Amino acid sequence: MTSKTSADLPATAPAVAGTSAFVLVYHRSPFDEKIDADGTRHWVDQKSPNGIIPTLRNLFRSQRSGTWVAWRRQDEEGPSDDELVQMDPPNDFMLRRLPLTTKQISSFYHVTSKESFWPILHSFPSHFSVDNSDWCIFEEVNASFARAACLEAAPGATIWIHDYNLWLAPAYIRKERPDVRIAFFHHTPFPSTDVFSILPWRDEILDSLLCCDLVGFHIPRYANNFARSAVSLRAVKGVDPVPVAEKFRRNGSALAEPFVVPYLMHEGRRVRIVASPVGTSPDQIRRIASSPEICAMSKQISEQHSDRKLILSASRVDYTKGNEEMLLAYERLLEADKTWHGKVELFLGCVAAAGGMRIYDDIQRAVEEIVGRINGRFARIDWTPVRLSTRRIPYEELVAWFGEADVCWITPLRDGLNLVAKEYVAARRGRDGVLVLSEFTGASVELQGAVLANPYSHGSMDRAIAEALVMPKPEQCERMVTMNQAVEEFTVEHWAEQQLGELSVL
């Protein structure tokens, strides 16, 4: 992989338009940068590659060349050039990294995005804080991302922006490059209008998103929430909703919607709204599962949990993830039914959050305390009820756990989608297994064979895990077939094609 700064570019390089027909804008780089002791730089895969990064990276690997715009940390204050890196095959794309200072990253990402936006997006207004937010820095950083995207985009290019911390980028891009097509995708929930309205910058955010040609969401509920906010707060003209696809209809589920708004009219332009969930790469998951190394790892896990039901849960430390509620439900199970003593184990992969935010430190401590109490109350010399791992589990190892877990227990209080649930299903094709899923995850709308639970209700959580542990194998297989059909249909390729394909007809 070769790199150069923008100062190294030829003097004849165009000042406005670039050469990339496709520009992807996401704040993080597609690979982690590793600097050896001698100063040699390597690009390495992330320690935990499940999630948005590999999903976006696969777009270039499978079908598109172009440019990825991300940040890089600049240790010293003062002006600095963007860095251009040509990624080696099979990742045939240019990486443009714009310099951000430690102060900018802290303010833009850790404060404004995580302390102000994150709790509102996930409908936790009690955690909302605006005291430390610096809106000018947020505007400044978004303008920098927009500038970099404009420099890379060829005339008439598609610029695809990802996630809420780049909310303002579309407006800056539209002003400078009216020739390009702009798409935006939310990887988080979008809240109801009354919750979204808490944000003091709601007008600027909506006005920027309305500069897009297309705004995408995982499920119809989030799309409708955005449309209602635009109509209510910015006097945008809405259109009549249309029935949602049958595959999104799950009557009685908390996030189900029978209709969805297809587009909005704003300043003479049509803003398309598309609801389609991010998918996985099922074939890749199964290739990993069948490799000799992972087969050996799976065998080891199986031997360690022979004659016991293995429950797997994987998330990170966050107040939205419901780890405490799940552990308390597990504790109630062991209290209520002693026949499970020595017959069930819970493996919880709960990745610790980055330091510096007290709320996450408190949650981490609470999770560890509950695990310690459960093991202290119920453990025997030959049985530990809960195994807690706070390290980042390599993706290949996680696939091995998927293959051996009798139950996958994913019950966040709120989650935009949850790819772990879909990856578990993909790894279990043709087999049994039970997915216990919060009805407040986007994935609950499409995975209609999952056992749904309301994580706010003790009774619902208790019934769901009890049902999962005794479910007959024929029923498990039948439900898994249903869920695998959804996973096979909503792949990452399908998601990209549906989102970007809509631009071609606008």
Image: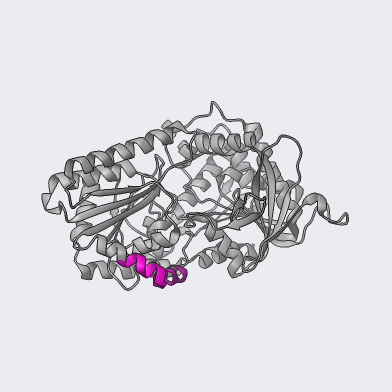
Q: How many marks?
A: 0
Q: Residue at x 22, y 49 (%)?
A: 385
Residue 366 placement (x, y as % from top left): 33, 36
Q: Is residue 379 magenta?
A: no
The answer to which of 96 and 347 lies nearer the viewer is 347
Residue 434 placement (x, y as % from top left): 28, 61
Secondary structure of the magenta portion, mostly? helix
Residue 201 placement (x, y as % from top left): 58, 34
- Most extreme residue toward the front is 38
Q: Quadrant of residue 364?
A: top left
The answer to which of 95 and 305 lies nearer the viewer is 305
Q: Residue at x 60, y 40 (%)?
A: 205
Q: Residue at x 29, y 46 (%)?
A: 326
Instruction: Say if residue 197 shows up in the picture.
Output: no
Instruction: Say if residue 38 shows up in the picture.
Output: yes
Q: Quadrant of residue 311?
A: bottom left
Q: Residue at x 20, y 59 (%)?
A: 308
Q: Is residue 287 magenta?
A: yes
Q: Quadrant of residue 101?
A: top right
Magenta-drawn segment: 283-299
**176 sits to left or right of 329:** right
The C terminus: image quadrant: bottom right
